[in-house]
Image (cartoon, rainbow, N blue to C red):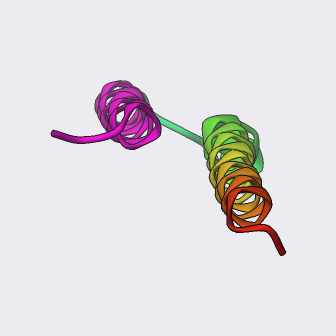
Amino acid sequence: MSSRPARYLAAAAVLLLVIIGVLEAGASQASVTPARAMRDFWYVFALFAVAWLVLLGWIFSIIRRIVRLERRSGR
């Protein structure tokens, strides 16, 4: 049975893929001029920030588990 953080991470990954798919489908239908090209990639930066938050949360949870194990072992 998988742990709760692993399920949350998997759910976040699926959600990110769905968001990317929806936004790319909409972007492929629109005609974009070169001047607006970078402004239309706002979601890439937003998803990059979300990915970093998920990664940092995962690292923080690992650190908490290590500290908890060290306290239990008496170190």
Q: Which stretch did the figure color magenta? A: 1-27
Q: Relative to 68, is 24 on the left or the right? A: left
The residue positioned farthest toward the bottom in the image shown: 75
Quarter assignment of residue 74: bottom right
Specify the quadrant that holds the N terminus: top left
Q: Is residue 39 above or below residue 67?
A: above
Quarter assignment of residue 72: bottom right
Q: Relative to 72, is 23 on the left or the right? A: left
Look at the magenta stretch and give its main secondary structure: helix
Residue 28: tell me if it is visible.
no
Q: Relative to 44, is 25 on the left or the right? A: left
Residue at 69% across, 67% down: 73
Q: Is residue 32 above or below residue 18?
A: below
Residue 22: tell me if it is visible.
yes
- Residue 22 covered by magenta stretch: yes
Q: Nearer the viewer, residue 19 or 63?
A: 63
Measured as percent of width and height from the top left, residue 8 is found at 43, 31
Specify the quadrant that holds the C terminus: bottom right
The residue positioned farthest toward the left in the image shown: 1
Measured as percent of width and height from the top left, residue 13 is found at 38, 41
Measured as percent of width and height from the top left, residue 24 is found at 37, 37
Residue at 40% across, 27% down: 19
Residue at 75% across, 39% down: 39
Q: How many marks?
A: 0
Q: Is residue 14 above or below residue 73?
A: above
Q: Nearer the viewer, residue 49 or 26?
A: 49
- Residue 44 covered by magenta stretch: no
Q: Relative to 4, is 74 on the left or the right? A: right
Q: Nearer the viewer, residue 67 or 29?
A: 67
